[in-house]
Amino acid sequence: MKRLCLLIILALVLIAAFPAVGVAQDEIAVTFSDAAPYFPHRITFSLEAESSAQITDVDIEYRVEKLSLVPVSCRVDADFTPGLRVEASWDWNMLETGGLPPGSEIEYWWIVEDAVGRRIETPPRTVSFDDLRYDWRSLTSAPITLYWYRGDHSFAQELMDAAHEALGRLAEDTGVALERVVRIYVYGSFDDLRGALIYPYEWTGGMAFADHGTIVIGIAPENLSWGKSAIRHELAHLVVHQATFGPYGDLPRWLDEGLAVYAEGVLQLGLLQRLNEAISEDELFSVRSLASSFPTDPEQARLCYAESYSLVAFLLSEYGREKMLELLDVFKGGSGYDDALMEGYGFDMDGLNELWRASLGLGPQPTPEAPGGFFTCSIARKTGGGDERGLILLGALLLLPAMAFALHRARRGR
Ligand SMILES: [Zn+2]
């Protein structure tokens, strides 16, 4: 009896391991299946199948592993010529759909149909969209794994320490904690980073793929101190994104950026000076005007980041972390900016503006305010091929030093 059981188990294992073996002739048989990643531009999926009747339809369905409210899969037609034996393929062109961060896991399966109505669905397989152009080393300190290829171990360790400092500061002062694992890919230069992105901006120094829990960033070993701030900042965006993720979750810009700058640690001297200057001239932007996009002008944008920090620091010091957590929770449940503040603190954005200004020794907001405009550290939602991805572009706080660094390098005649 025991031997019979073993034989049955062995038979089942063999059938599972070699699905093409033992397929009856009156079924569609898959003889080959593969997915080849060519980071960052495309993944080529291939399939070979045969049947006793003409194969008339071959589709591929795939799903990207990421934070989502409901599992979303996409189905596309493969290229093939109908016949008894077919070679089918589909090229996922990221230039058309937008890119994925390195390390993305894609689950896929094929659906094949023939002329007599037979249909098979292959068992799901997974392909990793890895950037194989570099010799990555990795360092894990849960819940973060950092990948890098330039610089020694202590370079990576310092970046990892900075990331954990940011997590500690956020958890201690705001109560917000990371809920999922995070992967940080440290490219060895801005140029290398841009070579890993689809249509990057010229000045892109890093990017947080919030739904994927992945940060990609360009940090040369000699640019370590900028890199540490940049990692703290982007990590905070991920933490806050995870904590407020929901069908409605959308934060006012000053809160999202304010928490990110707060996570960096002490406010940078340049930003502090810009803030003090604006306070003494009574030229602060109002809380309401900081709720959406930030101005394109770099100096004004710097002031927006400094003010966002100041607002978050004010809320934390006056009302504590419990209120902040409550506020983020209200946003998660879906609430307008004014309603959420009212529910959490008992005042709206104008009320907050007044209290915050008073704490800085200022009276009512002067009118009119300087006009704002679009700025790039915002959550962009893109839909293409049914695959919706949310990504946070790098903040001005990162961009400005990044641009300064790039200019600096250019001036040195690099
Ligand atoms: Zn930011």
Image (tube, rainbow, N blue to C red):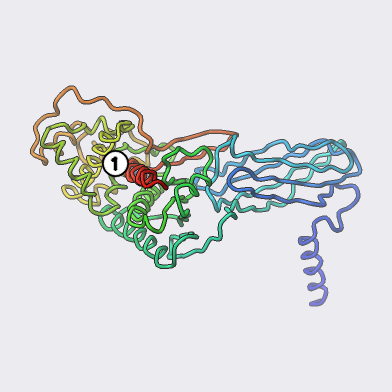
For this orientation, the residue located farthest to the front is: 413
- Please tell me in which quadrant of the rendered image residue 22 appears: bottom right
Check the image and report above or below for 46 versus 282. Answer: below
Question: Dot 1 surroundings within 10 Å: few (below 14), some, or many (20 or more)?
Answer: some
Q: Can residue 243 be seen in this view?
A: yes
Q: What residue type is labelled 1?
A: Leu
In the structure shown, which secondary structural element does the residue marked by tag 1 occupy? helix
**Residue 386 vs residue 412: left or right?**
right
Please report the residue visible at 21 percent of the width from the left and 31 percent of the height from the top: 286
Residue underneath mark 1: 255
For this orientation, the residue located farthest to the bottom is: 2
Residue 34 drawn at (x, y percent) = 73, 51
Image quarter in which the N terminus is found: bottom right
Residue 60 drawn at (x, y percent) = 70, 42
Check the image and report above or below for 49 versus 369. Answer: below
Q: Is the CB–ligand 1 distance for label 1 below 8 Å?
A: no
**Residue 335 vs residue 12: left or right?**
left
Please report the residue visible at 12 percent of the width from the left and 33 percent of the height from the top: 281
**Residue 246 vs residue 117: left or right?**
left
Check the image and report above or below for 288 versus 90. Answer: above
Check the image and report above or below for 381 versus 181. Answer: above
Residue 76 drawn at (x, y percent) = 68, 37
- Please tell me in which quadrant of the rendered image residue 89 appears: top right
Q: Is residue 329 visible?
A: no
Residue 5 drawn at (x, y percent) = 79, 72
Please report the residue visible at 46 percent of the width from the left and 60 percent of the height from the top: 146
The mark tally for this picture is 1
**Residue 253 vs residue 135: left or right?**
left
Q: Nearer the viewer, residue 225 or 383?
A: 225
